[in-house]
Amino acid sequence: ARGEGGWWELVTDKVQPGDGYGFRFDGGKVRPDPAARAQGGDVHWLSRLVDPKAHEWRTGDWKGRPWQECVFYELHVGTFTPEGTFEAIIPKLEHLRETGITAIELLPVAQFGGQRGWGYDGVLLYAPHQAYGGPEGLKKLVDAAHERGIMVFLDVVYNHFGPDGNYLPEYLPEFFHQEISTPWGAAIAYDEAPVRDFMIENALYWLREFQIDGLRLDAIDSLPFYNSDAADELHL
């Protein structure tokens, strides 16, 4: 049904976690949900329903550590272990702690095309990369890190979308500025309120649903709102 502000919604009890879904426009191909919490596979596959409350946090009262105690280790999930997954990192956390590491910064983990990559070409910003273990794997890693007193920060990319699997122009062409470019393609239209809402909610999503301790924003000088009044609205 069509709701207020042009948004469409469906309320049903005929689905369950793990079910696949997508959206079809005017008889076209089925596309993944740009705000999906998980993918069933690659960026072109159906999105997957997730119960955001299924994970039972062991460290729900975690409050982080003082900033002056931060000793960072930048970590690429795909190459840190032979398995290249979130859960495969957990047995290595004790070693990191013993070396004096108090915080890990994960390179971008939002779903991108292919199995392995740096992560800076993400296209489904709410879906932890399925090849790494998806949302449940990431929550297990964060939980285990916090148990050991290690904070978890996340590198996020809000200046562009990758070229493989970016279907947002089919949903809303106005999401991008064709007349404004970044080194990686058309700039994101942050002057549009729904676009800002999409990105702000994404930042809050990582902090709230995954208990991420903080975010590192990539290449903010390539964001259209950099050094503008709009930056105040995006400040968390």
Image: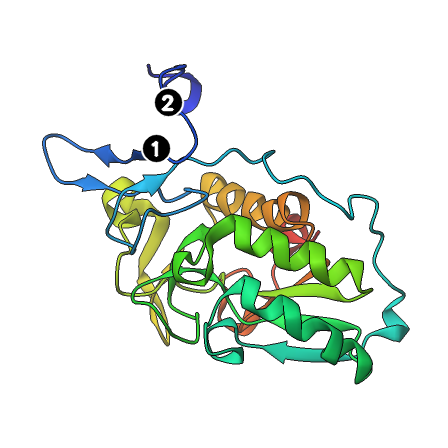
Answer few, some or many: residues within 10 Å of disc 1's Cα (few below 14, many 20 plus, some between 14 and 19): few
Return the residue at label 1. 19
Relative to 120, does residue 6 appear above or below in the rendering? Answer: above
The residue at 43%/76% (across/down) is 118
- The answer to whether mark 1 and mark 2 are in CB contact below 8 A is yes
Secondary element type, mark 1: loop
Q: Quadrant of residue 21?
A: top left
Relative to 8, does residue 128 appear above or below in the rendering? Answer: below
The residue at 79%/76% (across/down) is 97
Q: Position of residue 216 (x, y in %)?
A: 63, 67
Return the residue at label 2. 15
Q: How is the image coloured?
A: rainbow
Would you say 143 lies left or right of 162 here?
A: right
Q: Nearer the viewer, residue 63 or 125?
A: 63
Answer few, some or many: residues within 10 Å of disc 2's Cα (few below 14, many 20 plus, some between 14 and 19): few
Would you say 79 lies left or right of 69 here?
A: left
